[in-house]
């Protein structure tokens, strides 16, 4: 596939990976002067930390670019058309969907550790409470009840820390932005 990609364009599979986080680009942005491409979030973080230089070559980055980097729309379009191999299971995935694939790829999770996503549980308050009049809570994993907030935290950390559970994701700002970008792209097709 990498050969097909190279033949069809001037890009190689490595061009779809961010030099900062070493992952497939997410919302790629390009610097004007040196034309280096980064994930939007990686670029903005680097700009907050290092100031006025490209995170890759240390070239100058304008104030306007630091505040609102230019999206690499041409690269986003190419990422929608071409596939690459998952680092772990070798399954062919469109580049723009690769990060989504990593979240469900068992081999990727085994290789790079448990997902960094923290489960967001709905913790139900027991109706009875305890003798001190403070509210008590039920563990959403084992249904054991009568915990204070702190004891529930301690219980989950000691009994369920490495337990794999279904995750109810809350979208961070970058994910919301990416979703909006993808939806707008679909509308424009």
Image (tube, helix red, strand yellow):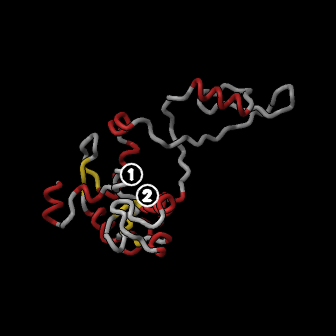
Q: Secondary structure at mark 2?
A: helix
Residue 64 position, x and y percent, is 47, 75
Residue 50 position, x and y percent, is 47, 60
Name the mark on residue 21: 1
Locate residue 83: give its quadrant: bottom left
Please report the residue visible at 71 percent of the width from the left and 31 percent of the height from the top.
150
Q: Which residue is mark 2?
A: 42
Please report the residue visible at 56 percent of the width from the left and 51 percent of the height from the top.
170
Please report the residue visible at 20 percent of the width from the left and 59 percent of the height from the top.
12
Q: Dot 1 surroundings within 10 Å: few (below 14), some, or many (20 or more)?
A: few
Circles 2, 1 touching at the beta carbon (< 8 Å): yes
Q: Looking at the picture, tell me which residue is in the foreground, 124 or 98.
A: 98
Q: Dot 2 surroundings within 10 Å: few (below 14), some, or many (20 or more)?
A: many
Residue 102 position, x and y percent, is 37, 45
Residue 18 position, x and y percent, is 34, 56
Locate residue 53: give its quadrant: bottom left
């Amino acid at each position: 596939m990498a050969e097909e990609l190279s033949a069809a364009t001037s890009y190689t599979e490595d061009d779809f990976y961010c030099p900062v986080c070493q992952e497939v680009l997410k919302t790629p942005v390009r610097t004007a002067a040196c034309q280096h491409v980064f994930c939007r979030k990686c670029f903005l973080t680097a700009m907050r930390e290092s100031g006025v230089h490209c995170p890759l070559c240390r070239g100058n980055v304008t104030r306007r670019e630091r505040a609102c980097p230019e999206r690499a729309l041409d690269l986003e379009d190419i990422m929608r058309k071409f596939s690459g191999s998952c680092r772990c299971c070798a399954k062919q995935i469109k580049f723009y969907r690769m990060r989504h694939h990593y979240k469900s790829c068992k081999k990727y999770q085994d290789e790079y550790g448990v997902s960094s996503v923290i489960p967001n549980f709905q913790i139900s308050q027991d109706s009875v409470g305890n003798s001190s009049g403070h509210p008590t809570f039920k563990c959403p994993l084992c249904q054991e009840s009568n915990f204070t907030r702190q004891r529930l935290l301690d219980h989950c950390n000691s009994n369920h820390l490495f337990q794999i559970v279904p995750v109810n994701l809350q979208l961070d700002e970058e994910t919301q932005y990416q979703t909006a970008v993808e939806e707008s792209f679909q509308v424009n097709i």
